[in-house]
Image: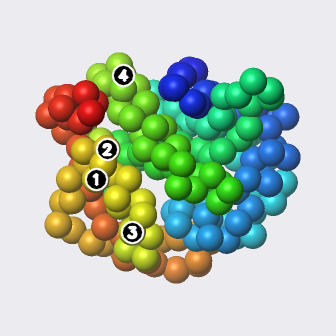
Amino acid sequence: MFARTERLLLRPGWAEDAPALAKAIADEAIVRNLALAPWPYGLEEARAFLDKTADPVLPSFLLLRRSEGEPELVGGAGFGRAPGGGIEIGYWIARAHWGHGYAYEAGRQLIEIARTLGLPRLEAGHFVDNPASGRVLEKLGFRPTGRTVPRHSCARGSEVACRLFTLELAAGEEMLAA
């Protein structure tokens, strides 16, 4: 599955993306805010991630900035199973691209994809020491559930407090018009 936004191309990762992926995500400030990514993260970890069998129902994407020249990998985003069994979204942006609205732009596209897939609801969460991710979720229309739960961070090697959010897709129409 591929998708395009004004500035981004969302596409599956391919084996030849491993060096660019390793370079973009190999930053402890990024990986420590992800539940499943290990630290340190190098070429071997990028290859292992890209070798995983893609789930057609829960796709993952590399985010490439569209430009006149060659597209540049700016992050990743996708769907997964939340610990409670629901469908959640996740995303990360390479440090050089923080503050440019790419997480929000990719998140909007993930919501559209979820609607196309017929998903009635999405979940998300962010570690409490990463409030910027929470602001992205709120801007996307996700609502806090009022619950903060421990969630394992592979990079940190420990449980971290995670604030939970939900988005009822049928109720999110007004956000997409914004």
Amino acid carrying mark 2 in the image: Leu
* Disc 2 element: loop
Residue 93: percent from the left, percent from the top? Answer: 59, 52
Residue 34: percent from the left, percent from the top? Answer: 54, 62
Q: Which image quarter: residue 70?
A: top right
Residue closer to the observer: 80 or 21: 21
The residue identified by callout 1 is 138
Number of callouts: 4
Labels 4 and 3: the sequence-earlier one? 4
* Disc 4 element: loop
Labels 2 and 3: the sequence-earlier one? 3
Quadrant housing the N terminus: top right
Q: How much space separates mark 4 and mark 3, taking CA atoms? A: 29 Å
Q: Are marks 4 and 3 in contact (CB under 8 Å)?
A: no
| Extreme residue in the bottom direction | 158
Q: Are marks 2 and 3 in contact (CB under 8 Å)?
A: no
Residue 137: percent from the left, percent from the top? Answer: 34, 52
Amino acid carrying mark 3 in the image: Pro
Amino acid carrying mark 4 in the image: Leu
Labels 1 and 3: the sequence-earlier one? 3
Q: How much space separates mark 1 and mark 3, taking CA atoms? A: 11 Å
Q: Is residue 23 left or right of residue 144?
A: right
Can residue 92 be seen here?
no
The residue identified by callout 3 is 131
* Disc 3 element: helix
Mark 2 surroundings within 10 Å by alpha-carbon count, few (fewer than 14), some (14 through 19), many (20 or more): many
In the image, which disc is placed on residue 117?
4
Labels 1 and 4: the sequence-earlier one? 4
